[in-house]
Amino acid sequence: MNVTKAVYLAVGIFCSALSHAAAGNASPEGRTALDWLNRPDVVEKFGRIGDAIWSYAELGLQEHQSSALLIRTLENAGFKVEKGLAGMPTCFVATYGSGKPVVGILAEYDALPMLSQKGRVPKREPLVEGAPGHGCGHNLMAAAATAAAIAVKQAMEQHRFSGTIKLFGSPAEEILVSRPYMVRAGLFNGVDFVINNHASSTFETGYGVSGSAMISATFTFRGKTAHSGGAPWAGRSALDAVEIMNVAANYLREHLHYSARIHYVIPDGGEAPNVVPDRAKVWYFVRHSDDKLLETFERVVNCAKGAALATGTELAEIRVLAAAHQSHHNKALAELAMKNIQRVGMPQWSEEDHQFARALQKELGASPTGMPTKVGTLQKPATVFVGGASSDHGDVTLLAPTATIRFPGIVPGAHGHHWSTVASGFGSGAWKGINAGAKAMAATALDLFTQPDVASAIRKEFEDYSAKHPYQSFLPPDARPPLDFYDKLMSLYRPMMEPFYLDENLKE
């Protein structure tokens, strides 16, 4: 996993080539930010930050190393950082400047279970068998968002215009925890615009309603223990209740709209087959459109109640861990972001980048086309909603005009939440993607500060939309962030992963 200094310098050269044209077409404020991001030492710094977070691969609400690195970077750059917010130790908000407008940039940094993989190795080869990995590119997103926020500060200092830039450090996005709780805590109050981002194999953005709303909840059943062989009639199996609930939910699928999604795992199913388990727990994700989510979740709850009745057990707890809306992206802001994406352009990948991409694509059975060479187009909303993935930034899109910039770095054909994304989210190709994403975000933020007519039109669109779509949280009033949810799993793997940790200076 050694990466040579020559490779790092090559990254800077390639990123430098792509940005001179972009800087030439930008405003004076934009040129300042792009010139700063174009410096080889800046490219290297944030590439190393992305690689360091990749190596930490911390699960949701366990991102202590990752958040500390980002906080340290922002504080050293002159941001004021508030930590441990919204009841989450790894949640933070970094702020620079004062007054209006207030522009927010979102950052995520949690990994996924079971996806450990060596970087830039085009076949399944875990770094630590069974350990977490960054299978959604959040390490790239955290580095790019941080670089963008600091680049905006550079322009604010040099050109002396008013306004506030905020970076929202958002933990546990993979289990949709952070933003709904951050919204409830008032962290987005007074924010005028929000720029979200996501690692991708494309370079584009879009507008309209997308993704699925989702409720994440655990169902805990209580029964009675007994000798499974000697006197099973004396027991009441909590595991039976879990299994009957799951059977009922699977039969329920036939009668749900095709855009619904239901998935589950059983984190606690007893300890030994010769003891009737008196406790069991199942964890559900229930997804649908905003208008159908609560009704669908209630039908799943009824499956749990029926299972308890059928087995003579108690449905002891329904714990809602998270609940998030669909994404409602602002068209005018997306159009502005797309102009900046086109200005920045696709990174100039090296032949080594293309070779790795083709090898990974071949391993996955995809067409060996290499890395992408052209930016995408402005994506329009789907004509028919058919369901899909979820993101907890959906709640934010109902509080402030928001657009998501999808920036390159992940190999085309790599699967989301899969080892192939982990493999491609590290090293030189990832560095170039981080740099391109940071430039598009910084340029868009600066346009919002310096083009009041454009900003006003974006706000007008949002206010008209909000009048018809007022925000209401899906979180129950008693819901709290599940701080201990991944504690045992991270405690198990962290000691095995620590020998592979990189810091931002790439000391191994």
Image: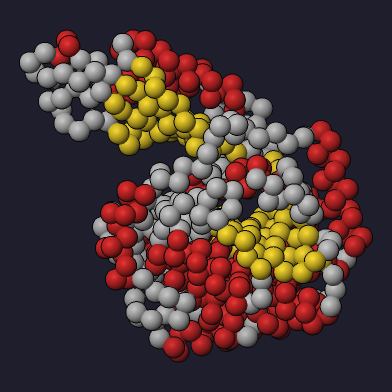
Of the pair 339 and 220, the residue shown nearer to us: 220
**Residue at 59% over, 28% down:** 293
**Residue at 31% over, 64% down:** 497
- Image side of residue 394 versus residue 103, left or right: left
Q: Quadrant of the C terminus?
A: bottom left
- Image side of residue 341 versus residue 412, left or right: right
* Vertical placement of residue 118 versus 255, above or below: below
- Image side of residue 463 versus residue 73, left or right: right
Give coordinates of residue 264: x percent, y percent. 40, 33
* Vertical placement of residue 6 versus 167, above or below: below
- Image side of residue 343 versus residue 175, left or right: right
Give coordinates of residue 496: x percent, y percent. 27, 63
**What's the coloring here?**
secondary structure
**Residue at 50% over, 73% down:** 49
**Residue at 43% over, 31% down:** 218
Residue 282 can be seen in this image: yes
Q: Quadrant of the N terminus?
A: bottom left
Q: In the rendered image, which quarter is residue 296 located in?
A: top right
Give coordinates of residue 111: x percent, y percent. 44, 56
Of the pair 81 and 102, the residue shown nearer to us: 81
Give coordinates of residue 445: x percent, y percent. 76, 65
